Amino acid sequence: MEYRHLGKTGIRVSELSFGSWVTFHNQADVKAAVDMMSAAYEAGVNFFDNAEVYAGGKSEEVMGEAFKQLVWRRGSYLVSTKFYWGLYDGVNERNTLNRKRLIEGINGSLKRLQLDYVDLIYCHRPDKTTPIEETVWAMHNIIEWGKAFYWGTSEWDAAEIVSAIEIAERHHLHKPVTEQPIYNLFERQRFSRAYERVYKEYGYGATTFSPLASGLLSGKYSQGIPENSRAALKGYDWLHDHVTDKEKLTKVQELEPIAKELDCTLSQLGLAWCLKNPFVSTVITGASRVEQVYENMKASEVAPKLTPEILERIDKIFGVKKEEDED
Ligand SMILES: NC(=O)c1ccc[n+]([C@@H]2O[C@H](COP(=O)([O-])OP(=O)(O)OC[C@H]3O[C@@H](n4cnc5c(N)ncnc54)[C@H](OP(=O)(O)O)[C@@H]3O)[C@@H](O)[C@H]2O)c1
């Protein structure tokens, strides 16, 4: 496992990390979480991603209980959580990054995770109604109080990120240090030219999510929706169109000969492709069972096999022309 700096911070994250969206509580109980987290940790993963909204807070509870059982040295791993959607329907508690909600949010997350601090907190989405300055101050204060060490954004646009950085610089506050964008073979737009500027000029990190497009890139949906897959879960019908899209399935099928040539699985190829982007600090993987973790962690060994020629062949499958931006 390689470790990359989180943007221009002093902290280093394993290039593959592990997150709990959908899976913890819904598909994985504490025992399964312990198994998957240890498999990841033993493979070198040092970063575990969560959010208060995942499974309505239960995902943090499962991860917290898992940490308790795993008794790892706290300095050996990083944990993150995120705020925006909230857990309650109060007028100041949904879809917001107001100061009150963020501070109540971190206190609730720390309780559920049974931790004194998390390492990284994210604003899970931009809030168009709260002044960015208010959010920057709240994130700064949470860090100053030792409840988190770094903060970042998720799916913010480049102008919002630059605005937050500039506000923080103006007032000598803790700046956001990383974005958490979607990034996979089908979804590259967050790495368009506009974002490259944020990565290049501000040294912003990128902790990318959904590297397998919710499992589609593993090839598991080629014969329909398997019973024990994410798309078959109650409440995930919105994924059906995505995983049964003929054009997308054809592209996945076209990747198969390349995976065969490289002696890897489609999942490993999809993850390795994300790792090749030099702006990526870590690729946050997800898994519903431990076998997937074992398989996915080997993507680190596959990445060096992705030569410029192989990358060009992959781009061709996805209709991306050389030198052309992918947005
Ligand atoms: N910031 C945000 O807004 C945001 C949004 C989404 C995710 N995230 C973060 O990113 C993490 C990863 O996202 P994701 O879960 O969507 O990642 P993903 O890699 O796109 O999908 C993971 C899912 O694909 C299936 N899978 C994984 N490995 C497989 C393998 N080797 N073979 C077959 N199926 C496999 C599993 O689902 P099944 O087995 O159930 O089919 C697994 O839960 C999340 O846990 C979360 O921490 C953040």
Image: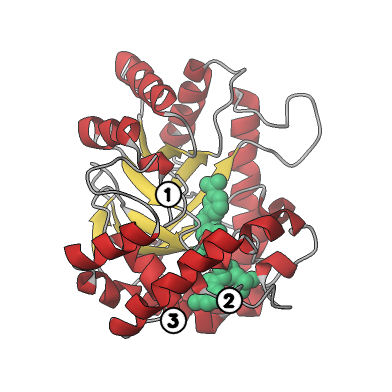
Q: Quadrant of residue 27?
A: bottom right
Disc 2 target residue: 220
In the image, 103 versus 127, the foreground residue is: 127
Q: Is residue 106 above or below residue 62?
A: above
Task: Label 2, secondary structure: give it.
Answer: loop
Name the N-terminal-most of marks 1 and 2: 1
In the image, 266 versus 25, the foreground residue is: 266
Tag shown at residue 119: 1
| Amino acid residing under circle 1 | Asp
Location of the C terminus (image quadrant): top left
Disc 3 target residue: 295
| Amino acid residing under circle 3 | Glu
Name the N-terminal-most of marks 3 and 2: 2
Q: Is mark 3 within 8 Å of ligand 1?
A: yes
Q: Quadrant of residue 140?
A: top left
> Which residue is drawn at the image coordinates 74% and 69% (left, top)?
232
Location of the N terminus (image quadrant): bottom left
- Residue 26 seen in the current view: no
Q: Is mark 2 within 8 Å of ligand 1?
A: yes
Tag shown at residue 159: none
